[in-house]
Image (cartoon, helix red, strand yellow):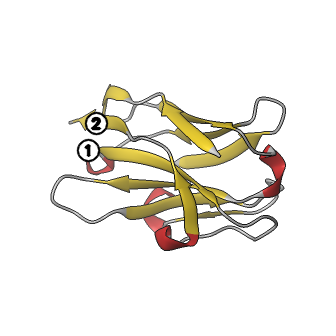
């Protein structure tokens, strides 16, 4: 599968952005997907994941209640709605897809087999 992320940008603290991750080349509704981020000088961090059906989601504690992950089967696209953004959310955000079908949501980066290019999110104070 090929993944194409988009939707990043510059926003003030308290603002919102919606990231998209379009998938190509594989039946969309059969594999878990996730979002990760990497800030300058820091390691890649798990942000959110969604199961193959969309029925189960998991978030890292720092974004709970502010971010919402979802997937649209018809559009073959995963989303990350980010509200109440904070400067510490500034990072390059990447989407990922599981290499194996029918598994649950995945929180570890090395469990994923496919990655999209990153999209920059910058939150100013």
Q: At 59% across and 41% down in the image, what residue appears?
A: 2
Front residue of 35 and 97 = 97
Local SS, label 2? strand
Residue linked to disc 2: 123
* Residue at the image position 49 percent from the left and 39 percent from the top: 83
Furthest-left residue in view?
A: 41
Q: Position of residue 35 (x, y in %)?
A: 52, 53
Image position, residue 103 (x, y; %): 76, 70
Q: Where is residue 50, by image quadrant? A: bottom right
Q: Is 117 situated left or right of 2 in this image? A: left
Res 12 → quadrant: top left
CB-based contact (under 8 Å), mark 1 and mark 2: yes
Q: Nearer the viewer, residue 81 or 119?
A: 119
Question: Mark 1 — residue?
Answer: 87
- Crowd band around label 1 with a 10 angstrom C-alpha radius: few (<14), some (14–19), many (20+): some
Q: What element does badge 1 sit on?
A: helix
């Amino acid at each position: 599968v090929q993944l194409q992320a988009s939707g990043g940008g510059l926003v003030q603290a308290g603002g919102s952005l919606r990231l998209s991750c379009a998938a190509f080349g594989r039946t969309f509704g059969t594999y878990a997907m996730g979002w990760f981020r990497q800030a300058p000088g820091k390691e890649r961090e798990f942000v959110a994941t969604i199961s193959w059906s969309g029925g189960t989601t998991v978030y890292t504690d720092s974004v709970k209640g502010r971010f919402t992950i979802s997937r649209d089967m018809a559009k073959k696209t995963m989303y990350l709605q980010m509200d109440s953004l904070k400067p510490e959310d500034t990072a390059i955000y990447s989407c990922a897809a599981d290499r194996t079908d029918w598994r649950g949501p995945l929180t570890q980066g090395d469990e994923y087999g496919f990655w999209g290019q990153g999209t920059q999110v910058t939150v100013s104070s």
